[in-house]
Image: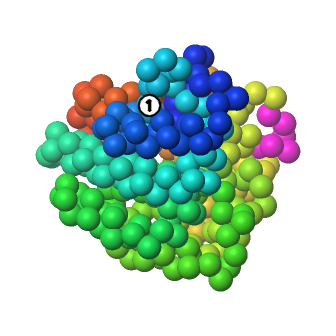
Amino acid sequence: GPDRFEVYEHSVHSQVSPAVIVNWLRRALDDGDLSLVYQPIHDMTGEVVVAVEALLRWHHPTEGLLLPDIVLPALEDSGLIVDVGAWVIDEACRHARRWRDITPHGMPPIVFVNVSPRQLLSPDFLPTLEQALDRHGVEANQICLELGTLAAVPPSSALWMLLRECKALGVRLALDNFGADDSSYGVIRRLRLDYLKLDKQLTSARNATPQDDAITDSVLSLARALGFETIAQGIEDPSSLERARNSGCDLVQGFYLGLAEAAEELDHKIAAGRSARHAVFH
């Protein structure tokens, strides 16, 4: 999802300047203090882990965990997102290899990694991605680049060609928060995606109206026609899971199904139920 930093109650105060946050994170990156946690993405039974989404986490020694709406703009504006993003890709590939090794007779989970336009437009992005895949011996189709809003990216941008090159490499592509605004439709015209992650307003059962159901049905029909798998995110209660099932979504993600955990804590869930997944990983 859009929040690549875990949110906890005791978080850095919003009045801390972006420059200070950037300095903290640069030091944490240099000192090896960053870590990743992973939120599972399940099949429609809610039992089999088909994929995981990588989320960056860092505990400040005194301030706790950082809020994404404070950290992400600071990283983007400073350009540090390029270095931090490269570390995330490498670490995600390391864990992807770990999960492949513990599922020798089945299929490992697809690892979703959030990327921003600034990261993608870095001249080192594609070489960094290829090197991480090679270094850890990971198949490209075990990694999925999750794209946030691309509304401000012009049709002439080199970003679109870069994403097509990633796709040609075998890496999967997902569009986050589909349906949140009209700009999403421009993206699916330009890219051959693998997944649409539906915006929470399309998947939540809370206060859902017949109009909401009709819109969700039309989005899912479009996704099927284009050959995209759909992920209902923001599943926070049994009724939302049931709504996603009835709507015909392919996969589900949310607090009701599982919180983000360290890679080691997910091992037993990933190692279980592999035989049910052979048709999902292709």
Residue closest to the eye, 119 or 272:
119
Q: Residue furthest bottom?
A: 156
Which segment is the magenta one?
208-213
Answer whether residue 168 is magenta in the image. Answer: no
Please provide percent x and percent y for residue 61: 44, 20
Residue 7 visible to the viewer = yes
Q: Quadrant of residue 266?
A: top left
Residue closest to the eye, 43 or 22:
22
Taking the spot 32% from the left edge, 56% from the top edge, the residue there is 142
SS at badge 1? loop
Q: Quadrant of residue 203?
A: top right
Please provide percent x and percent y for residue 172: 42, 62
Residue 7 relative to residue 43: left or right: right
Residue 45 relative to residue 226: left or right: left
Taking the spot 39% from the left edge, 27% from the top edge, the residue there is 261
Position of 37 relative to 88 (above/below):
above
Dot 1 amino acid type: Trp
Taking the spot 80% from the left edge, 34% from the top edge, the residue there is 208
Residue identifier under label 1: 58
Position of 236 relative to 156 (above/below):
above
Taking the spot 51% from the left edge, 25% from the top edge, the residue there is 65
Q: Dot 1: within a 10 Å radius of its alpha carbon, few (fewer than 14), some, or many (20 or more) residues?
A: some
Please provide percent x and percent y for residue 14: 69, 29
Residue 15 relative to residue 175: left or right: right
Specify the principal SS of the magenta part. helix
Answer whether residue 210 is magenta in the image. Answer: yes
